[in-house]
Image: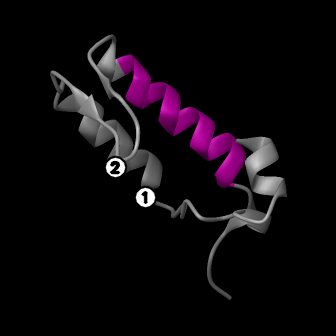
Amino acid sequence: MTEYQAGPPANCVPYAQNTGRLLEGLASLNPRTLAIVHLSSFTGDRRGALHDLAAVWKDVLGKPSNQFGP
């Protein structure tokens, strides 16, 4: 994801102040399957995957230089 952010499609995944909260909220629903757009479905540790995704997105996308807007 870090390399992706360094290339032409950088910032194609928006990260906002409430992104982490929304991902944690999804994890709290304890989904049975994660069906990701353009990727395979996942039925492993879904809650853990969403927690991990929130952490990685915050680390990679949550930097001020990667924010959308003015």
Residue at x-position 78% and y-position 66%: 8
Residue 12 is inside the magenta segment: no
Residue at x-position 66% and y-position 53%: 61
Instruction: From the top left corner, tell me how far across and down residue 39 is, in percent.
Output: 40, 37
Q: Looking at the image, which residue sits at the far bottom? A: 70
**Residue 12: quadrant of the picture:** bottom right
Q: Which residue is mark 1?
A: 18
Dot 1: element = loop
Left or right of 67 on screen, residue 48: left
Looking at the rendered image, the quarter that the C terminus falls into is bottom right
Instruction: From the top left corner, tell me how far across and down residue 51 is, in percent.
Output: 44, 28
Q: Which residue is mark 2?
A: 22
The answer to whether the residue labelled 2 contacts the one labelled 1, judged by CB atoms less than 8 Å apart, is: yes
Dot 2: element = helix
Looking at the rendered image, the quarter that the N terminus falls into is top right
Which of 37 and 26 lies nearest the eye of the viewer? Answer: 37
**Which region is colored magenta?**
48-62
Q: Residues within 10 Å of mark 1 (few under 14, many from 20)?
A: few
